[in-house]
Amino acid sequence: MGSFASVSLARLTPSRHPKTRRILRVEIADQIVTDRVINERMGKDASARFRLTMNRAEEGQELDA
């Protein structure tokens, strides 16, 4: 992940540690809707993510990261 040192990366991503991570079963009720939602959020089309962000921006709170 970018320029992180392996120690920093391990500290920032504890859920990836084999002894502490959890696997959760997910049941999908509607595959078409699920596919659309996943593609909006993680698909190759960045404009879909941008539209989602802009449409829901007022729901968010300010974040100083």
Image: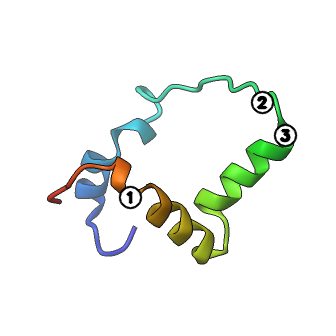
In the depicted structure, whether residue 63 falls above or below residue 23: below
Quarter of the view holding residue 40: bottom right
Task: Check disc 1 and report the residue beneath it.
Answer: 57
Pointer 2: residues within 10 angstroms few (<14), some, or many (20+)? Answer: few
Q: Is residue 25 above or below residue 11?
A: above
Q: Secondary structure at mark 1?
A: helix
Badges 1 and 2: C-beta atoms under 8 Å apart? no
Label 3 packing within 10 angstroms: few (<14), some (14-19), many (20+) = few
Secondary structure of the residue carrying numbered label 3: helix
**Image side of residue 20 versus residue 37, left or right:** left
Residue drawn at the location 35% of the way across and 46% of the way down: 13
Q: Is residue 48 left or right of residue 35?
A: left
- Circles 2 and 3, Cβ within 8 Å, touching? The answer is yes
Tell me the number on the disc at residue 28: 2
For the residues labelled 1 and 2, the Cα–Cα distance comes to: 27 Å
Q: Amino acid at mark 3?
A: Gln
Q: Nearer the viewer, residue 2 or 7?
A: 2
Which circle's residue, 3 or 1, is located before the other in the chain?
3
Q: Which mark is residue 31?
A: 3
Residue at point 46% right, 29% down? 21
**Quadrant in which the N terminus is drawn:** bottom left
Quadrant housing the C terminus:
bottom left
Name which residue type carries label 1. Ala
Vertical comparison of 19 with 17: above or below: above
Number of numbered markers: 3
In the rendering, at what x and y percent does residue 63 appear?
Answer: 20, 55
Residue 24 location in percent, x, y?
60, 24
Q: Nearer the viewer, mark 1 or mark 2?
A: 1
Instruction: Work out how far the residue at label 2 is from the one at label 3, CA to CA, in angstroms.
Output: 6 Å
The secondary element bearing badge 2 is classed as loop
Q: Position of residue 51 (x, y in %)?
A: 55, 68
